Image (cartoon, rainbow, N blue to C red):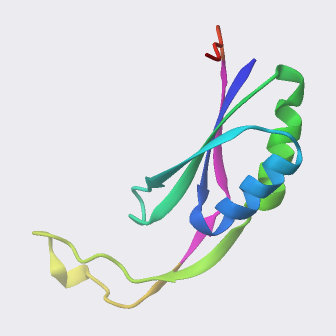
Amino acid sequence: MKLILAVVQDQDSNRLLNALMENNFRATKLATTGGFLRSGNTTFIIGTEDNRVDKALEIIRENCKSREQLVAPISPMGGNADSFIPYPVEVEVGGATVFVLPVDRFFHF
């Protein structure tokens, strides 16, 4: 058995949850916050048998695409403001960060 932790952008979370449910995966959906852009994202916790991990990864890959987004930079606190550029910057967001972990024991009460 494996535990899959998938951190995805909020925009992709509902589509991913629907696709997981359509393929009979159980998932717990948690609201989380990323450190880089300090924006909301969603973390999915998925428990599955070893032979279904590749299918889960395929579903995540198909439903979580990266995209370009304009982001207003955060001003430096106490730092040198001379090099601060207050213009929006285009960055790549989205996609998914996925961890697959072994599960020694599983209980369902």
Up the image or down, 2 lies above or below 83; here it is above
- Image-based side of 75 in relation to 89, left or right: left
Up the image or down, 34 lies above or below 46; here it is below
Q: Which span is picked out in magenta?
A: 91-102
**Does residue 93 show up magenta in the picture?**
yes
Q: Nearer the viewer, residue 13 or 22?
A: 22
Magenta segment's dominant SS is strand
Q: Residue furthest front?
A: 109
Q: In which quadrant is the N terminus drawn?
A: top right
**Residue 33: % across, % down:** 42, 56
Q: In which quadrant is the C terminus drawn?
A: top right
**Does residue 64 show up magenta in the picture?**
no
- Image-based side of 3 in relation to 59, left or right: left
**Residue 31: % across, % down:** 48, 54
Measuring 63% from the left and 69% from the top, which residue is drawn there?
11
Measuring 31% from the left and 89% from the top, which residue is drawn there?
86
Q: Nearer the viewer, residue 16 or 39?
A: 16
Q: Residue furthest bottom?
A: 87
